[in-house]
Image (cartoon, grey):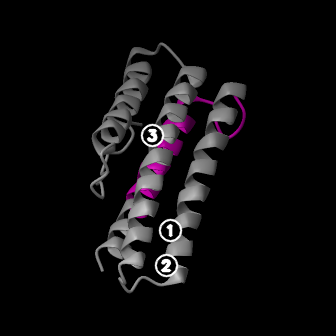
Amino acid sequence: MKPQSLPFTSNQSVDATSIEQALNDLSTFWNEVHELGRGPKFEEFGIRIDELRKKLAAHFVFTERRLEALRNLGEPISTSECDQLLKQHAEFLDRLAADVERLEAHEAPFMNWGDVGREFDEIIRRLAQIESNDETVLEQ
C-alpha cells in the first residue's frame, strides 16, 4: 500500500515549497520503510508529521491574514466563509497534533505501518480539499 500522490497546491505562500518538500519527504520516508521492511518507525514519522504541522500552521496564518486584508479592502467575503476556513485550519492542525501523539504512543489507529500510510493518504486528501477551499474563497 503506497500513499497517494501529493496534490498540494499553494495559495502563494512563501512556505509552499517547504510544505511540498515536507509532504514529499513524508511519502518517501513511508515508502522506504515499507519497501525495505525496516519499520515501523512510528515515532520518527510522528516527528516528521509535527514538522509538517508547524509549517502548515504558519501557512494557514499567512492565508488567514491574506483573507483579512482582502476583506478590509472591501472584497465580498462573508463572515461565514471566513469562519469556515478558520475552523477547517484549526481542525486540521488539531488532527495532525493528535496523530503525532498517537504515533508516539503507538496507539490506535496506528497498529501497523499500513495504518500510517492510510492516515497519510487521508491527510493528503484533506489538505488538498482545504487548499482548494482556501483558493476558492480567496479568488472570488
**Quadrant that contains the C terminus:** bottom left
**Nearer-N-terminus badge (3/2):** 3
Read off the residue under disc 2.
81
Looking at the rendered structure, the secondary structure element under dot 2 is helix
Looking at the rendered structure, the secondary structure element under dot 1 is helix
Measuring from the top left, give residue 76's x and y in whole percent: 38, 86
Measuring from the top left, give residue 17's x and y in whole percent: 27, 40
Q: Is residue 113 visible?
A: yes
Q: Nearer the viewer, residue 58 or 9?
A: 58
Q: Nearer the viewer, residue 117 or 26?
A: 26
Whole-angstrom CA distance, mark 3 to mark 2, is 23 Å
Measuring from the top left, give residue 112's x and y in whole percent: 60, 29
Q: Judge from the rendering whether residue 98 lies leftward or rightward of residue 46; answer left or right.
A: right
Q: Nearer the viewer, residue 37 or 6?
A: 6
Residue 136: numbered disc = none
Q: Residue at x 53, y 44 (%)?
A: 119
Question: Is residue 22 placed above or below 66 in the rendered structure?
Answer: above
Q: Are marks 2 and 1 in contact (CB under 8 Å)?
A: yes
Whole-angstrom CA distance, mark 2 to mark 1, is 6 Å
Read off the residue under disc 1.
85
Graded by Cα atoms within 10 Å as few (under 14), some (14 to 19) or many (20 or more), the crowding at tag 3 reads some
**Nearer-N-terminus badge (3/1):** 3
Q: Judge from the rendering whether residue 52 lies leftward or rightward of residue 99; answer left or right.
A: left
Whole-angstrom CA distance, mark 3 to mark 1, is 17 Å
Residue 55: numbered disc = 3
Numbered marks: total: 3
**Quadrant that contains the N terminus:** top left
Q: Residue furthest front?
A: 73
* Residue stretch rendered in magenta on the structure: 106-130
Query: Magenta part mainly helix, strand or loop?
Result: helix
Q: Residue at x 38, y 60 (%)?
A: 131
